[in-house]
Amino acid sequence: GEEVERRVSPIKVKLIDFGLACPASAVIPGDCVGTVGYCAPEVMLGLPYNEASDMWSLGLVAVELATGVPLYPSENDYDYLKFIIETQGQPPDHVLDSGVYTENYFIGDKYTQQRHESLETRYIILTRLDDLEQIMMFRRGPEAGQRLFVSLIKEMLALDAHQRITPSQVLRHPFYLKHHVYRNKFHTNWK
């Protein structure tokens, strides 16, 4: 692929497919909306959800932009949830206990592979999100801010939506502040 020198010409990304977007007040718990591979756990499990689920999706898009591959590519909900658990652990009990669809994926307190044959579709297999830093260094070389980026991603991909970082907190996160200062210093006409 073509590489862009981001300090000379910052990359522009266009996000599309907001056809299912609605106000948080219009959300009906149990409605499964979104794209497999980008849905937040609360959506998959049938819990009430809000804009925190968008932060989850944005975190996955950010990982894909940083690594060049999706973090949890899958063709079905079951494998997607399996990949999340293998990387980030099981969602907290209070999340699982509140899910309308939890029993579709879990028996008691364990994830079940009953009646399902999983397909390994991941390009990168992580045992924890902290490993993203090494993946990025391998693919792009060492860069300032990789550790801060992973810190931000971990907050965006918190398994409990109530613990997930908010948009205003993202703007105050050290990763964003570091890069915002850089942009203002070198790109005064940035739009």
Image (cartoon, rainbow, N blue to C red):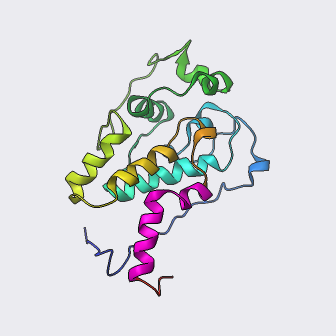
In the rendered image, the quadrant that contains the N terminus is bottom left
Residue 73: image x %, image y %? 40, 43
Residue 183 among magenta residues: yes
Which residue reaches farthest top? 108
| In the image: residue 1, left or right of residue 173 | left
Part of the protein shown in magenta = 167-186
The spot of residue 66 in percent (x, y) is 35, 57
Residue 45 position, x and y percent, is 61, 31
Q: Position of residue 177 (x, y in %)?
A: 47, 64
Residue at (33% x, 55% y) in the render: 146
Q: Nearer the viewer, residue 188 or 74?
A: 188
Q: Is residue 18 left or right of residue 70?
A: right
State whether the magenta stretch is mostly helix, strand or loop: helix
- Of residue 169 and residue 30, the one placed in the foreground of this image is 169
Q: Is residue 132 above or below residue 106?
A: below
Picture quarter containing residue 92? Answer: top right
Could you tell me if residue 131 is visible in this image? Answer: yes
Give me the residue at 44% from left, 40% from top. 75
Residue shown at 54% from the left, 59% from the top: 172
Q: Is residue 161 left or right of residue 185?
A: right
Residue 16 covered by magenta stretch? no
Inspect this view and state whether residue 12 appears.
no
Q: Quadrant of residue 62?
A: bottom left
Residue 5 in the figure: left or right of residue 65: left
